Amino acid sequence: MTWRDELAAMKAEVHETFAIPVTIQLPGNPLTVAARHHRAGAVVGEEGYTQAIVTDDRLVFLLDDLEGNTLSRGIAITTPKGTVRIAEVMPPDINTVTVVVGA
């Protein structure tokens, strides 16, 4: 097993452990899959001056779960806490794709 295979297996296990059910409202074909919620944050501003914490809510999908469908900006996703829209699609990695979502 290569390092890449081990990383993919680890990501799949983390995904399975923390995933929530979501429905991606694809045009004409809603798709229910598992996704992980991830909140990314960063402190912006200069030290000693006004600083702010900026956070992005993200959903992480396994590429295999998307069944060849492409995610794009504006697609609605229904989660257990409500409906959000894709604001940005991050480049895919080994076996996942991450989207930044907003209300």
Image (cartoon, grey):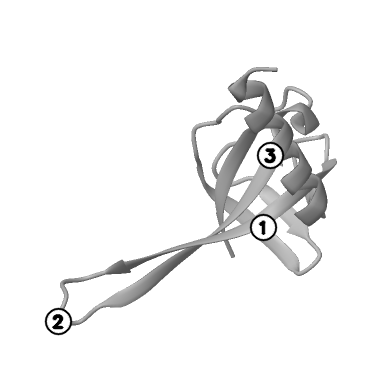
Q: Which image quarter holds the N terminus?
A: top right
Asked whether the viewer can see residue 24, the reply is no
| Structural distance between the alpha carbons of marks 2 and 3 | 38 Å
Residue 70 locus on image (x, y percent): 65, 29
Residue 5 locus on image (x, y percent): 67, 22
Amino acid identity at mark 2: Tyr
Which of pointers 1 and 2 lies earlier in the amino acid sequence? Answer: 1
Circle 2 is placed at which residue position? Answer: 49
Asked whether the viewer can see residue 68, the reply is yes
Residue 11: image tag: 3
Q: Which quadrant of the view contains residue 98?
A: top right
Front-most of residues 61 and 73: 61
Q: Which quadrant of the view contains residue 54?
A: bottom left
Which of pointers 1 and 3 lies earlier in the amino acid sequence? Answer: 3
Query: How many numbered marks, from 0 up?
Result: 3
User: Dot 3: what SS?
Assistant: helix
| Structural distance between the alpha carbons of marks 1 and 3 | 14 Å
Could you tell me if the residues under marks 2 and 3 are in contact, i.e. CB atoms within 8 Å?
no
Choose mark 1 or mark 3, whichever is in front: 3
- Give the residue at x 83% y 39%: 31
Q: Within 10 angstroms of label 2, few (less than 14), some, or many (20 or more) residues?
A: few
Amino acid identity at mark 3: Lys
91 vs 53, left or right, is: right
Residue 37: image tag: 1
